[in-house]
Amino acid sequence: MLPGIFPFGVITGVAMVASGIEPLVAMAMSIAVFAGASMVASAQLLASGSPALLVILATLFINLRFMMYSASLRQHFAHAPLRVRLLAAYLTADNAYGLLLGREGDESSKLHYFLGAGASIWIAWQVSVAAGILVGAGLPAAWRLEFAAPLAFVAMSVPLLRDRAMAGAAIAAGVTVIAAQGLPLRLGLAAAALTGIAVGLLLERRRT
Amino acid sequence: MSVWPVLIGMALVTYLLRASFLLLPPEVETPALLKRALRYVPAAVLTAIWVPEVFAPGDERLLAGVVAMAVAWRWRGTFATIAAGLLALHFFEWLT
């Protein structure tokens, strides 16, 4: 799982600096926000002069999936002490959650595993973002590395489409985001998220 | 506009989303419909992020995106998908 983090972390660092974010701000964002997808998107929004509230709103929608992880983690960690839950919340990332899904064992071993995996991913992530920030400005534009950011999302989303409802949710979201391109900046993302969820739920209900 | 207030806002929003359900007391049940709805968030949101960057008519990005989708579907690797997509982008650019 860790080898997948490095390219995305480096790309995130490169993309933020390429959008004109100061290196120090980019690194602070990486530590405070610790969510690559929203960092790349908000760097682009900030570079295009979007209002602060819209950037934060886009962050909210892009990171809404963490709420799902939180609901899912709660089934295992609800009885852990509050400060452990607060730490687990900070370390929640797509990869750590994915690793936990495939893990057998009792609740306590799962919690330790999740915290361990989360901490390793956190370190790998910060190191790779820092590397991306450092090399960022030095990479030739002809390499078109900016295209690596959407490709990283292709890599994260396509393997999720293993059943009809999931595929329906993704396709509906994709069509909506194209249709809503006239909406100011990333507000189409909100519309896409809601349509995707609705279509996923509808297809799920019909199947059963 | 200073970027720091935006950064703090992003950090707060993101942390609150991560902590949301973990902060509830153990005896509270998660509503079933909400749990089902949240299952579709990653597929919907992650797709909606890349689609506008890839579906550009008459552009080699669309062809490169199709190659990347095929690689992601078959091998699931982040690195393989990014590498295949970038190589395909340069290949189709060179062809046209």
Image (cartoon, coloured by chain):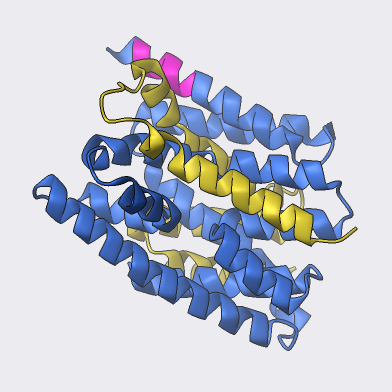
Chain colours: A blue, B yellow
Query: Which picture quadrant has residue A139?
Result: bottom right
The residue closer to the viewer here, A206 or A39, is A39
Query: Which picture quadrant has residue B26?
Result: top left
Give the extent of the magenta segment.
A199-205
Residue found at x 62% / y 40%: A60
In the displayed structure, B78 sits above or below A111; it is: below
Task: Work out whether residue B93 can be spotted.
Answer: no
Residue A174: x percent and y percent? 61, 36
Task: Work out whether residue A24 can be spotted.
Answer: yes
Residue A205: x percent and y percent? 36, 12
The residue closer to the viewer here, A140 or A49, is A49
Residue found at x 71% / y 57%: B7
In the displayed structure, A186 sits above or below A12; it is: above
Horizontally, residue A80 falls left or right of residue A69, namely left
The residue closer to the viewer here, B73 or A98, is A98
Residue found at x 9% / y 50%: A105
Residue A145 shown in magenta: no
Residue A54: x percent and y percent? 78, 41
Residue found at x 78% / y 75%: A22
Work out which quarter of the rendered image holds the C terminus of chain A and state it. Answer: top left
Residue A37: x percent and y percent? 58, 55
Report the magenta stretch's main SS.
Answer: helix
